[in-house]
Amino acid sequence: MSDDDSSDEYKDHSPDEDQIVDVPSVDYTVFYSDGTWFGEDDYGQFRLQAGHATDPTEKDLDYDVCGAVLKHSYERYGEKRYCGKMADTQFSNVTDDTTGYCSHHQNRVNLEKGHMENAKHLAFVESREDIFEYLSPHEQILAIETFRSLLDESKYGYESEMNTLTIETEQDTAFEGQDVEIDFPVPTEKTARGKALWFAALDYVRMENILEEQFRVAFEETGPDGEQLTVGETTKIVNVNDDTGEVTEDTDEHHLNLPLSRIQKDYERHLEVGGVEHDGTEEASEQEAREWVVTVEGDTNVDEVEPPDS
């Protein structure tokens, strides 16, 4: 603050003792407006006192509370802060349009839908370090077995140590709640090239997930004239007649085509770095949908993972 800040004019606007809060040592500006102290940082303006330090949805309140986590709360307050405003369920009956958030945070629903879709096909996950945690138990086993197969195919002849990895299956009814132990190969030499093959195995599972989603859309949807869509196509609304309400549709490229192409290129590049030959064709994009069978022994160790007989 400048020397002028010590004038009587500014002293009149000093916060009461119970308004003063401890904030992290970050580069931000503090200002006073309409009886409230605000801060301004690289993200924008914010109240110095805002939100709840504990999740209000877990409290016994007499109203429906929003509970959304405030943006940048760690940077601004040094802890997670939650919105305590009334949710839209307080003012209306629950419908498909009801979000459970306040008016300011209603767009969180779209973000959640986007996260759910991304967790399903993993097309937009930026870090491969996080991908494995998003996979279902079945997909985790598939990724490990694909990695093992790629190590065997590589021209570098990797020597590997086996580490036992426990796959938690409590959320997957196919495993009847039994965790699965599986041997995870860890190359002891040329580790950077071996890691590229692990990335390739994760890329492969991601491509399979995207293709599964595209097959589903092509199977469940039809074109504007009732024709069957091809894999990689979807439909879009191009016009709505204001008088009759008639909807005109057209075919469009599936929004996952672009990330699929990008992941395909990453897959081929990782195979090349790891020493596995690839003919450069769009093999993964042309594969038919298939099932994988996991055979689990009585001691919950994975016996084998293999495709069904063709």
Image: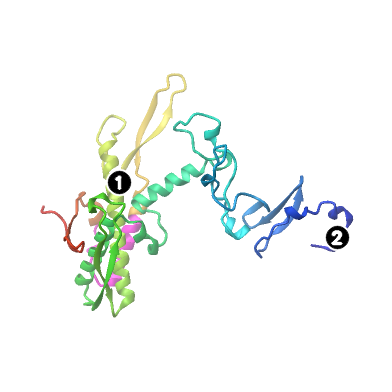
Q: Position of residue 249 (x, y in %)?
A: 36, 31
Decide if residue 116 is on the left or right side of residue 56. Answer: left
Q: How is the image coloured?
A: rainbow
Q: Which residue range is magenta in the image?
A: 261-282
Q: Position of residue 259 (x, y in %)?
A: 36, 53
- Residue 94 versus residue 65 in the image, above or below: above
Q: Residue at x 43, y 47 (%)?
A: 114
Q: Residues within 10 Å of mark 2 (few under 14, many from 20)?
A: few
Residue 100 in magenta? no
Name which quarter of the figure residue 297 lies in: bottom left
Q: Residue at x 61, y 49 (%)?
A: 51
Which mark identifies residue 6? 2
Badge 2 marks a residue whose secondary structure is: helix
Residue 270 in magenta? yes
Badge 1 marks a residue whose secondary structure is: helix
Return the residue at label 1. 213
Q: Closer to us: mark 2 or mark 1?
A: 2
The reply to whether the C-beta atoms of the residues labelled 2 and 1 are less than 8 Å apart is no
